[in-house]
Image (cartoon, helix red, strand yellow):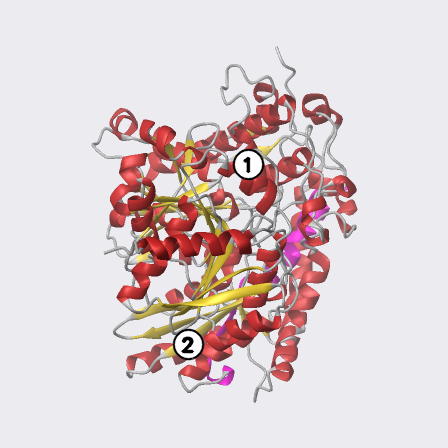
Amino acid sequence: MSKVYGTYLPRFPWLGELTSWLSRPVYELLFKRGNLRSISSPQAEQIIQHIQSKVAAGGTAYVAGLGIAGHNAGSSLVEISQDRGIQFLCNNEEERYTGIKHFSGYPDLSLKEVQVVLRERGLTLDDVDAWTLSWDYLGISPFGLKHLMNQFPAGLQLLNPKSFPKWNFWSTGRRARTFSKYMSEKFDMKTRPTMLMMPHHENHASFSFAVSPFGRSPDPTLVIVLDGWGDRGSMSVYQANRDGFRQLYSNESLCDSLGCFYSLISSTQGGWTTLSSEGRYMGAVAWGDQDRLTNPYYRRLRQIFYFAEEGKIYINRSMTNWQNTGEVAPYTQALKDIIGEPIAADKMWNPDAVLNVADVQHSPITRQRVDIAAACQLVFEDGIFHIVDHYLRTTGATQLVMTGGTALNCLSNMHLLEKYDESWYEKNLGKTARLNLWVPPVPGDAGVTIGAAYSFAMRCGFSAGHSLDHAFYCGKGVATSEILEAINEDKDIGYEELGNVNLPGDLEAIADLMAYIISQDGVVGVYQGAAETGPRALGHRSILANPCNPETLENINRLVKFREPIRPLAPMVTREQAERFFELSPGAVSDDYNAYNYMVLTAMARPLAYSKVPAIIHKDGTARLQIVRQQTDPLIYAYLKAMGRRVGAEVSVNTSLNVGSPIVQFPVQALAAMKRAKALTTMVMVGETGETYLVWHRDATPPKDSGEQLQKWVAEYRSSQVISA
């Protein structure tokens, strides 16, 4: 029998509470001087009344959301009117403009894009009615001090900037306090804007619920926020319907966190820095032992949490040390005895430090490493089930929105739907029902900027005007002239014009040419329109490949993305053929399976998929699919229909258009990614008004022989005169 450990609460909670209480007035004064105000302040109430009066009089109000300190800087904008409610205009992620993943500086470039949206409406930044922030810095600063003193004196080690290198409690508030002045000067505003500090978890929850298929439902919806931590805790639970929104619970703890657990274990066992480790580790799970009875690490690792009554979770502080040191020395000896030593920070793959992606030597994949990954996933899912189970039983809800960074774990999302089916509801609640689940395309901190704007707009009494059906809200479509300028200035690139995708005949011909190239095992990048917001490429900044060739997986991982061989490839598929190849869950049926639009939910592959599209099936038989709709992406939909004619499946491999960088935003970034990806044959680039160009490498040195090969394929295609009807 494994040894049982158990220390589950802070050492000196009274000292933490006292420190937080004493520090709050000091921080309130400091933030007031920086023109930052709490949402409960008189200034916030005045702005709410102003917006309500303006909209009631038939006017249109604008609310901006900003991420200004902490990882994932960005800028967003919503429009509010009496007849249309809240309209989502943009959610611009600063990392796309700077090329630095999880950029933590001021959102200068993304805010310039907000200026463009306003200018189209004859407005300036001074015309924005409310400026909201993605964090309540007045909450997070005393919260950080509280945690430090909870663990006194060991917690003092958290003062080390290396403890949480991507989030520094002590410098974040200082940067936030100077932003209003900086912004007014940088953008030549008439006045210094008042910044409203919005609760972080409320931001996650508000946007995710409002744009979900349940946002206009009279029935109760549970909204569960689980992340690393917010400004009040690391777990929050809300109940909402079309008439209201209320919080049921916050754990008010930084370290009793499923998000921290998964992030730190995936990093220190996977060998990638945090925020870049979680998705990679999830990919490794499929190669490990996923059976709770036979996995050699699961039973002992399970002791890292105490699952208490009422859905509460506490970490076992006899096994963890991150509550005292963060990332510096996260394990106790007890944890080392179970899973081994943590990988040191200087031995990890860090995307911010990678210059030559092709030269990266990834750590070898061993049975031990993948079994630990699987055990970590199983423990993580135990925690999810413990929380969800309690709140389903106490509320009787059948609708659930999962959000916060942990909701990107698409495997646990699928298992939620499998567990809480009709039989569970009949047995435990005595009613005929099942769980219906939805996850937004931006559940992580890239979504709290737009979340802040939605949260404030909802506090003003408005609701979302529509549910989400796509994620193309990062920036704007790029002018044809900008694409041509980038192409003509790059002497390594050749190109030709294909036509205009806004013309039906041209659209079908361009889509059919793409399908032909891919049917010959070419690899095609797509650059069109506004970029996707969120971590998943969904057809506007994508790399497409042949799902029918089992060698596609190795080709993409080794010669296009330069990543570990265990990483899966995701499929995109038309709605018409989604159920032909995948077992879509009845718990995701809302709004015609809208939950499958964003690659946040896996599905089991059907037998036909194994024989027809093997490249997109992961080791465990799952696929993280995206359903493509004609009304939201005509080009990719037409391409998938052409794939049906060419290869017999309206399916394509889809991975993000990036190589060791964030998803690309500008044409020059797209061309740079294509040149780094040695086996990327060509790229289709679409201007804002539809003009479309085929571009390729001029270099004919293998494996960059795409120019010569592409010309051959294009000539063959045109001579065949096979144009889709």
SS at mark 2 in the image: strand
Q: Could you say where residue 344 lies in the image, as x and y percent from the top left?
A: 77, 38
Q: Could you say where residue 291 lies in the image, as x and y percent from the top left?
A: 49, 19
Quadrant of the rendered structure where residue 577 is?
top left
Residue 387, visible in the rendered structure: no
Camera-side residue of 158 and 642: 642
**In the image, residue 324 lies in the stretch drawn in magenta:** no
* Outermost residue toward the front in this view: 719
Task: Give how far apart the Cα atoms at labels 2 and 1 are.
Answer: 47 Å
Camera-side residue of 398 and 40: 398
SS at mark 1 in the image: helix
Is residue 261 shown above or below 460?
above
Question: Label 2, on which residue?
Answer: 62
Q: Could you say where residue 512 lies in the image, as x and y percent from the top left?
A: 34, 54
For the point 62% across and 44% down, which residue is it?
562
* Outermost residue toward the top in this view: 1
Task: Identify the disc placed on residue 554.
Answer: 1
Which residue type does callout 1 highlight?
Answer: Glu
Is residue 295 shown above or below 272?
above
